[in-house]
Amino acid sequence: MLHFSKYKNLILIITFILLDQIIKILINTYWIDNYYDISNKIAIKPMLNKDYSYVNSTFGIDMSLQTHIILISLVLLVLIIIYKYILANNTNLRLLVLGLNLLIAGCICSLSDKFLWAGSLDYICVKGLLVLDLKDIYLIVAEIILIIWIIIKRDLVFRLNIRDIIRFVGDEWANYRMKNVIKHRKIKSNGK
């Protein structure tokens, strides 16, 4: 049985990110100009998506790289706040934690793509539909998990209060500042 501790979650997120980026490096190094049919519906077909996102590609919206980076960073910040709040106030949330881990890893992979690839190196071709990468699969699976979790735990979801979340963020920030002040005073007193 998996017990999701803080460090296990961090290791899991980092593993997801590394797996996504290592696969992209290998494909870019050894397979960038190749095509391989896995089945009559799926193929490996590497392509650099310079539209930065599925939204840009699908709807022809011309959002800049900087706009994408800002939006993804804001989504990531909100996700981390909600993640910490839910973990601090609830127990037995393995399904939700897995979904949030995948979502956070997907967002970080997306940011990495913007900086490392100036787009996204997509390589999984679902014929007639789209070309995606492992990060996109993380995000799709995370969305499915979160929808299932919301349906199962709708009573908990309806009890979430934005004021409590804001208060939690304020308390976390105050605790962080207090720890830094104490640490700074210890360093200062040890230096004399």
Image (spheres, helix red, strand yellow):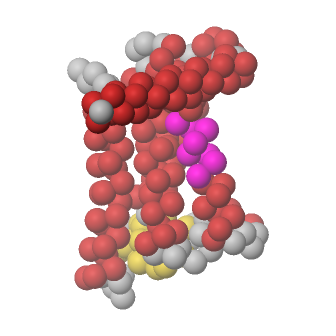
Q: Which residue lies furthest to the bottom in this view?
A: 33
Q: Which residue lies furthest to the front in this view?
A: 192
| Image location (x, y in percent) of residue 16 | 34, 50
Q: Image quadrant for the N terminus?
A: top left
Residue at 43%, 48% in the rendered image: 105
Q: Image quadrant for the C terminus?
A: top left
| Image location (x, y in percent) of residue 185 | 40, 28
> Horizontally, is 146 left or right of 164 in the view?
left
Residue at 48%, 36% in the rendered image: 100
| Image location (x, y in percent) of residue 159 | 67, 12
| Position above or below: 115 against 190 | below
| Position above or below: 40 against 5 | below
Question: Which residue is nearer to you in this view: 89 or 30?
Answer: 89
Question: Which residue is nearer to you in this view: 81 or 159?
Answer: 81
Question: Which residue is nearer to you in this view: 143 or 62?
Answer: 62
Magenta stretch prevailing secondary structure:
helix
When asked about the image quadrant of residue 56, the answer is: bottom right
Residue 34 within the magenta-colored segment of the rendering: no
Question: In this view of the protein, can residue 144 be seen by the observer?
Answer: no
Residue 74 within the magenta-colored segment of the rendering: yes
Question: In this view of the protein, can residue 189 be seen by the observer?
Answer: yes
| Position above or below: 188 against 29 | above
When asked about the image quadrant of residue 164, the answer is: top right
| Image location (x, y in percent) of residue 79 | 56, 38
Magenta span: 73-80
Residue at 65%, 68% in the rendered image: 66
What is the count of numbered marks? 0
Residue at 60%, 26% in the rendered image: 169
